Amino acid sequence: ARTRKHFSFELHASRVHEEYHCSIRTRESASRPVIPHQFLSLKPANREHAVFRLASLMVDLEARLASRGISPSSYGDTAAALAAIGFVATPEDLITREFTSRPNKPAVYPPNTRFGDGSFPVFYAALDESTSVAEVKHHVIQKEQFKSPVFYQLFSCRFRGTVVDLLGLESQYPDLVSKDESGYPFCQELGRDVSQRRKIAGILTPSARNSGGICSPVFQLSALSGPQILHRMRFTIESGNVLVDQAEFAS
């Protein structure tokens, strides 16, 4: 009798546990925006093109390590240790960093971006330099703690994979180009559908920061190759405005 009672209690607890988690999943699902059928019916197409991105990169790492008295025999170990904490030392790191999970962080990947909620990776890029600059300018001006110039490297790489084209849909779905984060939930659910359910490599979407510009969020590391640093750029905040110019690489 005790065995049956104990089994009955475990079965009841198991059902309660499952109903609790099912309730959570239902609430989470109910809170997510519904993706219109028009988006779900968009057919992916194979594309190959260059994409551009601005990112921080320590140029000439070995020279900088030497200037700080680090032995050449330790360069490899030092670079590996820096890479393990997200430090970017090579052009290849500029790509792989966005696809590297962060198990000790609240979100596995950078959270609360336009097309990503932190549960899956997104590599943000654009089809031209001016759109990349406009996107970064927006985020730089949001960070008022930047009282001195901020430096980025503009780099390009090749994209080759399947994409869903959202260009021309922004007038019908303004969340695609919302000026604030109010449109993020819709776009994040769209990103989740494209990357996690349909396994599509990327999206072509209008830029919210550069009229006529095209952004290209990428969800698969295998779709990117051949990163090349083009030049260094300096962002300076003056009287609430962001000034951008090219800067020489530091020696």
Image (tube, grey):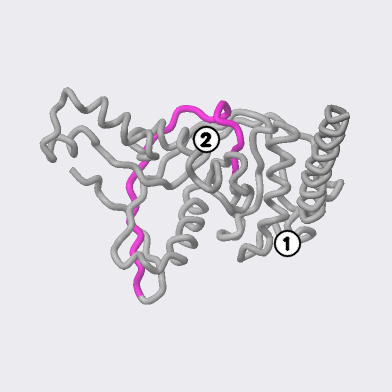
**Spatial CA span between label 2 and label 1:** 28 Å
Whether the magenta-drawn stretch holds residue 35 is answered as: no
Please name whichever residue, 84 or 59, is drawn nearer the observer in this view of the structure: 84
Name the residue rendered at 37%, 39% in the picture: 85
Q: Position of residue 98 (x, y in %)?
A: 50, 39
Residue 230 part of the magenta-drawn span = yes
Instruction: Pick the residue in front: 164 or 113.
Output: 113
Q: For the view shown, which residue lies furthest in the bottom direction? A: 239
Q: Secondary structure at mark 1?
A: helix
Residue at figure coordinates x 70%, y 31% from the top left: 199
At label 1, counting other C-alpha atoms closer than 10 Å, the crowd grade (few under 14, some 14-19, many 20 or more) is few
For residue 4, side relative to residue 183 (left or right): right
Q: Is residue 221 left or right of residue 245?
A: right
Picture residue at 61% right of the left edge, 56% below the top = 212
Kind of residue sitting beneath label 2 = Phe
Crowd band around label 2 with a 10 angstrom C-alpha radius: few (<14), some (14–19), many (20+): some
The dot on residue 147 is: none
User: What main secondary structure does the magenta stretch of the protein show?
Assistant: strand
Q: Which mark is residue 174?
A: 1
Q: Nearer the viewer, residue 94 or 132?
A: 94
Q: Nearer the viewer, mark 2 or mark 1?
A: 2
Span shown in magenta: 216-238
Give x and y (percent) for residue 241. Answer: 41, 71
* Residue at which label 2 appears: 99
Q: Earlier in the sequence, mark 2 or mark 1?
A: 2
